[in-house]
Amino acid sequence: MADGKGGGGGFVTGLLLGLLGGTALAMITTPKTGEDTRASAARVAGEVGESLSGQTNELLERGRMIVERARARVDGAVAEGMVAAEQQRNELQSRT
């Protein structure tokens, strides 16, 4: 997006890949039991899920705002078109 208001998809992807890579490296290099490793993985998965949920809600809200602004612009254009049509109709009727 050339206007500098990108959605941050690249950042989120990089963040998730870094998180997954770091988790995998930590699991490989630390001497933990299977139960500890599963608990750690579950915790990280929960954190990622919460993060994605928050970002999803933010994106939905931004989408709603965009739709509301577009709807207002369309409503304004329709109203202007109706006024112009009425003026044109009045002008044509006055000529006859």
Image (cartoon, rainbow, N blue to C red):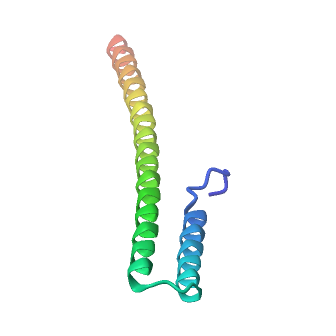
User: In the figure, 59 relative to 67: above or below?
Assistant: below
Q: How many marks?
A: 0
Q: Quadrant of residue 78?
A: top left
User: In the figure, 81 relative to 2: above or below?
Assistant: above
Image quadrant occupied by the N terminus: bottom right
Identify the residue at image location x=44%, y=80%.
37
Q: Nearer the viewer, residue 56 or 33?
A: 33
Extreme top residue here?
A: 94
Q: Nearer the viewer, residue 61 or 47?
A: 47
Picture coordinates of residue 81, whole percent (x, y): 39, 27
Identify the residue at image location x=47%, y=57%.
51
Is 26 situated left or right of 35 in this image?
A: right
Picture coordinates of residue 44, whole percent (x, y): 46, 68
Q: Nearer the viewer, residue 11 or 84?
A: 11
Q: Nearer the viewer, residue 73 or 11?
A: 11
Picture coordinates of residue 49, whole percent (x, y): 41, 62
Is 45 situated left or right of 31 in this image?
A: left
Image quadrant occupied by the C terminus: top left
Picture coordinates of residue 30, whole percent (x, y): 57, 84
Q: Quadrant of residue 14?
A: bottom right
Q: Quadrant of residue 72?
A: top left
Identify the residue at image location x=35%, y=14%.
90
User: In the figure, 35 relative to 7: above or below?
Assistant: below
Identify the residue at image location x=40%, y=73%.
39
